[in-house]
Amino acid sequence: MDINTLRSIVTLLAFAAFIGIVVWAWSRRNQASFDEAAQLPLRQDD
C-alpha cells in the first residue's frame, strides 16, 4: 500500500463522514430539537 492509496482511503472516509453528518442534520427526527435550539436566542426569560 503506497501513500496515494492511503490518501484515497482517508478522503473517502472523510467524505462518508460528511455525508453522514448531513443526513443526520437534515433528518426529520431531529427537526423538533433543532427548531427549539434555533429559538433560544430569541427567548426572553422573565
Image: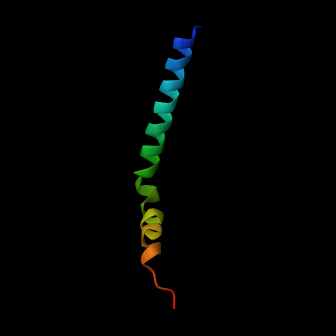
Q: Residue furthest right?
A: 1
Residue at the spot 42% in from the left edge and 60% down from the top edge:
31
Quarter of the N terminus within the rendering: top right
- As drawn, 27 above or below 37: above
Direction top: furthest residue:
1
What x and y, as percent, mark residue 24? 46, 48
Quadrant housing residue 36: bottom left
Residue 25's x, y, as percent?
A: 44, 51
Coloration of the structure image? rainbow
Q: Is residue 39 above or below residue 21?
A: below
Report the label total: 0
Q: Nearer the viewer, residue 1 or 26?
A: 1
Q: Residue at x 53, y 19 (%)?
A: 7
Q: Residue at x 40, y 56 (%)?
A: 28
x then y, percent, for residue 14: 50, 31
Q: Quadrant of residue 3?
A: top right
Residue drawn at 46 percent across, 85 percent down: 44
- 29 is higher (above) or lower (below) than 35: above
Residue 22: x and y, percent?
42, 45
The residue furthest front is 3
